[in-house]
């Protein structure tokens, strides 16, 4: 299994209510500004995004692709990511 960088793209208040263990919180508006949280992540690193319904994570996937990231998975939501990764 790949060792994913997990990014929760929900808003900070949603993240505080519960998130995937080890996930970093970077909402789409922050992603568009090139956040420092991604500075040391290689462009080909496996990244898994999630939100509530998969909509914001899909938008975020396109943002990251436009920044040159190439290995991105839309994990849809917290429950699906946890199930997929066996957490």
Image: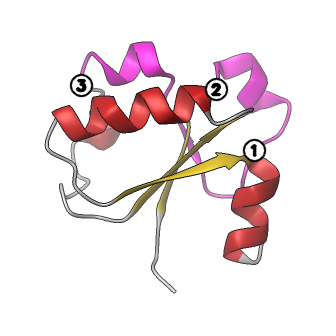
Residue 34, labelled with which disc? 3
Q: Quadrant of residue 53?
A: top right
Please, what secondary structure does the residue beneath circle 2 have? loop
Going by the picture, which residue comes out furthest to the bottom?
1
71 w.r.t. 3: above or below = above
- The reply to whether callout 1 and callout 3 are in contact (CB within 8 Å) is no
Label located before the other in sequence (2 or 3): 2
Q: Residue 59 location, x and y as percent?
A: 44, 27
Q: CA distance from mark 2 to mark 3?
A: 16 Å
In-image side of 23 versus 63 (left or right): right
Give the percent coordinates (x, y) of residue 7. 52, 45
Where does label 1 land, which residue? 19
Residue on which disc 2 sits:
10
In reply to whether residue 4 is colored magenta, the answer given is no
For label 3, the crowd category at 10 Å Cα-Cα, with few meaning under 14, some 14 to 19 and many 20 or more, is few
Q: What is the span of residues highlighted in magenta in the rendered image?
A: 10-34
The answer to whether 47 appears left or right of 38 in the picture is right
Q: Residue furthest left?
A: 68
The residue at the point 46 percent across, 76 percent down is 3
Judge by depth and name the residue closer to the eye, 10 or 75: 75
Q: Between marks 1 and 3, how big is the CA–CA gap?
A: 22 Å
Left or right, residue 31 beside residue 52: left
Contact, CB < 8 Å: mark 2 with mark 1? Answer: yes
State which tag comes first along the sequence, 2 or 1. Answer: 2
Give the number of the mark in front: 2 or 1: 2
- Quadrant that contains the C terminus: bottom right
Q: Position of residue 82 (x, y in %)?
A: 76, 63
Residue 28 is one of the magenta-drawn residues: yes
Is 5 located above or below residue 68 in the figure? Answer: below
Location of residue 25 with respect to 2 vertically, above or below: above
**Residue 30 on image: x %, y %:** 39, 18
């Amino acid at each position: 299994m790949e060792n994913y960088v997990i990014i929760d793209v929900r808003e900070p208040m949603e993240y505080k209510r519960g998130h995937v263990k080890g996930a970093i919180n970077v909402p789409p508006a922050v992603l568009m500004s090139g956040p420092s949280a991604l500075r040391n992540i290689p462009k080909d690193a496996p990244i898994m995004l999630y939100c509530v319904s998969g909509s914001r994570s899909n938008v975020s996937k396109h943002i990251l692709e436009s920044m040159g990231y190439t290995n991105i998975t839309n994990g849809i939501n917290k429950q699906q990511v946890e199930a997929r990764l066996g957490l």
